[in-house]
């Protein structure tokens, strides 16, 4: 399948307003994108890369990418999953080419019941009316558990369904849990763990465009890696080097340098591919490390 787009600029679909908007734009900026907003404020035009960002409803993102209106999209795995089930049921054979999980937008899709209701197991859902914006995911889960219940579709404000008498149970996204609490609902069962992900059109892109997409993917990989990585510097007794190396989280080959005026101590510098917590520093101290410094990493390219 060849791209139907004549335009050689990359279009990325991003949530217009919601939990992923700010993080998504921040990720693109960290990849080097600077942009100006169109008059209608729904398109951000890339100024230094052939990349434009379309701000749309999150539920529309998978469809736009699958139909090749956009080349890439940043959207929650919850919506990717619901849309995939819908698109497949509608006969689509090719959905998204690539799904890269990102490091923000963590939440979960969970069942919740009014606080006074006792919930013991999935069996407790049998015969109940379940309000949700994720009917396909919920139905598939109920099928898998062998439970017969009625799914009531709400496109928003799912959490008010029980107090309106429209449902007995809700199945909705939970992040901090504040929304459930505010509606006297208790979370009882998790159906899906979600976070933001990058999806890509199933259509083959023109070479120039494809090159830019590859470059962008590589930069995104670099940004994610950097956010997790730390540069650590410390002094260590030569005799404890083995133990110290073993304690450095996710570091490959640390640089070992002599220290002026002493033979039994060295300086160790290393890139840690995981965050360095206080606990790690305390363990390093216990085996003899001193003068420890942990620095953020600015950019990284393998
Ligand atoms: C979800 C969900 C709840 C809220 C839960 O909506 O529908 O309203 O977030 O978050 P909390 O546990 O931190 O209170 P979302 O903002 O994703 O909007 P949408 O589902 O309408 O797109
Ligand atoms: Zn939404």
Image: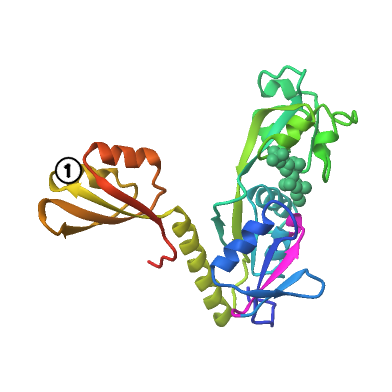
Near mark 1 (Cα within 10 A), the count class, few <14, some 14-19 or many ≥20, is some
Residue nearer the viewer, 152 or 112? 112
Q: Position of residue 40 (x, y in %)?
A: 82, 72
Q: Residue furthest front?
A: 261
Question: On the rendered structure, is 181 left or right of 155?
Answer: left
**Relative vertical location of residue 7 with respect to residue 128 in this rendering, above or below:** below
Q: Secondary structure at mark 1?
A: helix
Residue drawn at the location 30% of the way across and 37% of the way down: 283
**Relative vertical location of residue 259 with respect to residue 129 in this rendering, above or below:** below
Residue 134 seen from this side: no
Q: Where on the picture, by quarter, is residue 285?
A: top left
Q: Where on the picture, by quarter, is residue 295?
A: bottom left
Residue drawn at the location 55% of the way across and 66% of the way down: 30
**Relative vertical location of residue 86 with respect to residue 124 in this rendering, above or below:** below
In the image, the segment drawn in magenta is: 48-60
Question: On the rendered structure, is 222 left or right of 292?
Answer: right
Residue drawn at the location 65% of the way across and 29% of the way down: 189
Residue nearer the viewer, 288 or 186? 288
Which residue is the site of mark 1? 240
Q: Position of residue 274 (x, y in %)?
A: 40, 49
Q: Position of residue 173 (x, y in %)?
A: 70, 40
Q: Is residue 55 magenta?
A: yes
Question: On the rendered structure, is 70 left or right of 215?
Answer: right
Quadrant location, ligand no. 1: top right
Count of residue discs: 1
Residue nearer the viewer, 231 or 143? 231
């Amino acid at each position: 399948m060849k791209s139907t787009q004549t335009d050689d600029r990359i279009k990325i679909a991003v949530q217009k307003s919601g939990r992923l908007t700010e993080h998504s734009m921040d990720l693109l900026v960290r990849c080097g994108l600077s942009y100006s907003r169109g008059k209608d404020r729904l398109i951000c035009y890339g100024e230094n890369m052939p990349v434009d960002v379309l701000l749309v409803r999150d539920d529309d993102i998978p469809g736009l990418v699958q139909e090749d209106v956009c080349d890439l999209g940043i959207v929650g795995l919850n919506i990717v999953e619901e849309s995939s089930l819908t698109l497949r049921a509608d006969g689509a054979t090719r959905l998204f080419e690539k799904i890269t999980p990102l490091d923000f937008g963590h939440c979960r899709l969970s069942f919740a019941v009014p606080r006074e209701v006792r919930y013991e197991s999935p069996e407790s859902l049998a015969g109940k009316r379940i309000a949700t914006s994720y009917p396909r995911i919920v139905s598939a889960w109920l099928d898998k558990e062998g439970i017969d219940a009625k799914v009531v579709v709400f496109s928003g404000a799912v959490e008010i369904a029980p107090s309106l008498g429209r449902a007995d149970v809700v199945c909705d996204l939970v992040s901090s849990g504040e929304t459930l609490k505010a509606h006297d609902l208790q979370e009882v069962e998790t159906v899906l763990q979600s976070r933001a992900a990058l999806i890509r059109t199933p259509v083959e892109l023109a070479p120039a465009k494809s090159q830019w997409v590859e470059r962008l993917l590589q930069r995104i990989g670099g940004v994610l890696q950097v956010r997790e990585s730390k540069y650590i510097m410390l002094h260590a007794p030569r005799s404890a080097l083995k133990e110290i190396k073993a304690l450095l989280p996710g570091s490959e080959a640390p640089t070992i340098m002599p220290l002026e005026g002493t033979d039994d101590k060295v300086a160790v510098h290393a890139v840690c591919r995981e965050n360095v917590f206080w606990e790690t520093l305390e363990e390093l101290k216990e085996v003899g490390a001193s003068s420890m410094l942990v620095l953020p990493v600015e950019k990284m390219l393998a």
